[in-house]
Amino acid sequence: MSGDRLLDVVEDLRKKCLAKEEENCRILQLTETEYKGLLSLGNEERITCREFSLRMNLSVSRGSRIIERLHAKGYLDRADSCSDRRRKYVYLTPKGAAVRNKIDAQRQLCEKILVSAYSEAKLKKLKKELLDLTEKFEKL
């Protein structure tokens, strides 16, 4: 760890969490964007391509490229809208849902490590304090 400041501790924890996600991406043979794309969809959810792009904070054209890559890997499927032929929906295939479940399991393990040092009351207080801090940063 590089220092005694709280910001240094937060940065160190952030790096460790990101390193774990990068390791998961390598194991699952996903790019970071594909990984986030799978996380943006629930297992039983069907959303428009536009909604997919919005959730990922990407342009529709960039989102379409991610959809195409996930589709090519067999993780997503597409369907036409009954009411508007221009609208396409995307959803996880069973293979995609299985990978999404693996991602969730790894994230739950990280969450378990993060919360293990706190009682329920302390954890609730910590979450509130962190949310309050987040709001302060948004106002800067």
Image (tube, grey):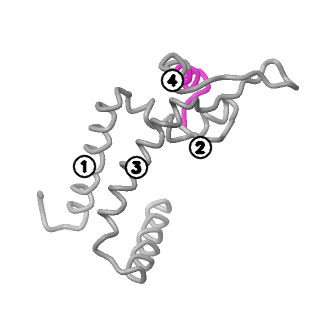
Magenta residues, start to end: 57-67
| Precedes in sequence: disc 4 or disc 1 | 1
C-alpha span from label 1 to label 2: 26 Å
Q: Is residue 82 above or below residue 117?
A: above
Outermost residue to the bottom = 121
Q: Which residue is mark 1?
A: 15
CB under 8 Å between callouts 3 and 1? no
Quadrant containing the C terminus in the rendered view:
bottom left
Report the amino acid beneath label 1: Lys
| Precedes in sequence: disc 2 or disc 4 | 2
Q: Which residue is mark 2?
A: 42
| Precedes in sequence: disc 3 or disc 2 | 2
Q: Is residue 46 above or below residue 66?
A: below
**Is 48 placed left or right of 13 in the picture?**
right
Looking at the image, which residue is at 51% across and 16% down? 72
Q: Which residue is mark 4?
A: 70
